[in-house]
Image (cartoon, rainbow, N blue to C red):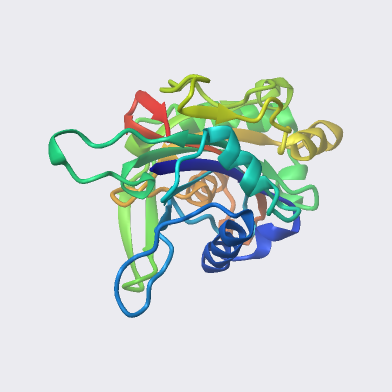
Amino acid sequence: MNVRVRFAKYGAVKFIGHLDVLRYFQKAVRRSGLKIAYSQGFHPHQIMSFASPLGVGITSEGEYMDMELTAEYTPQEIVDALNSAMVEGFTVLSARILPEPENGRKRETAMSLVTAADYLVTVKENDTFFTTKSLEELNDAWVRFYGQESIPVVKKVKKSNTETGMDLKPFLFGAVVGTEVTEAADISLPAVTAHNNDNTFYEVPEIPDFAAEQKELCIEKNLFSVVLRVSAGSANNIKPELVMEAFVRFLGCEDPEALQFRIHRLDMYTGENPELTRL
């Protein structure tokens, strides 16, 4: 059976990289007692894959992992077994049994399906560039920034160590600023959930507000915050840092890369914008 697991990454473990997360989950699955499938060959490895690597220093409540199991379990048994093996900083939130592909088609993994992601971005309280401006001024500036017909940026490509110019606007799918961000219980932008709580899907009864501390800090310190929906995946992967860099350049900052933000990934999606479905 093939399963898609959603989990949160928070606290101190935000400082460990993707390869360490992969190694951790391999050990956690073994400790959980779940019977996972292994690849063939001289160096067999657990059959699991992750939707999209999370940058170091970023927290999340919308991470997805696919794995193949050799025994039958209910989604709740999978969630409970994994959570029994988790350390502080990781929490499994849901599990979904994936249907078999039709007409002999190859199974699509979460990694190949992801097309968009939501992020909560907040200014750090020690940032002198932002804190010298009023929250109302920043919110008004964002409306003007987002309303532009074109948002030219320079995107750096690490693999080739090159830079390329692009228009960010077609890949910025949505945004929410102001009190709607800090006061709303569910600050994700609208999207469809394609599964219900039936025998193929289970979600923990109460999902903690992993962004609560971030939102409370925004209210207490009167800090600028924004929820972004951006293109994600292998084709056009837009990092929230690139959007914020464009915004601070719009505000007249000469060194936007020196500014610091707290970033929290809220969820990931598949499909074409605006008809997106949660993974």
Location of residue 161 in the rendering, given as x and y in whole percent from the top left corner? 36, 73
Work out whether residue 120 or residue 191 is closer to the camera in this orientation and state it: 191
Quadrant for the C terminus in the image: top left
Quadrant for the N terminus in the image: top left
Work out whether residue 229 or residue 233 is closer to the camera in this orientation and state it: 233
View extreme (left): residue: 103
For residue 108, which quarter of the picture?
top left
Residue at 48% x, 51% y is 242
Q: Is residue 42 above or below residue 85?
A: below
Tally the numbered discs: 0
View extreme (bottom): residue: 42
Q: Look at the image and tell me whether residue 106 can be seen.
A: yes
Residue at 64% x, 58% y is 57
Give the side of residue 138 with respect to residue 19, left or right: right
Location of residue 182 in the rendering, given as x and y in whole percent from the top left corner? 72, 27
View extreme (front): residue: 71
Q: Look at the image and tell me whether residue 120 can be seen.
A: no
Q: Is residue 106 above or below residue 49?
A: above
Location of residue 199 in the rendering, given as x and y in whole percent from the top left corner? 48, 24
For residue 224, which quarter of the picture?
top right
Location of residue 261 in the rendering, given as x and y in whole percent from the top left corner? 66, 50
Residue at 57% x, 57% y is 29
Q: Is residue 201 above or below residue 214?
A: above
For residue 164, which quarter of the picture?
bottom left
Give the side of residue 32 with respect to residue 213, left or right: left
Residue at 57% x, 26% y is 176
Q: Is residue 248 above or below residue 276?
A: below
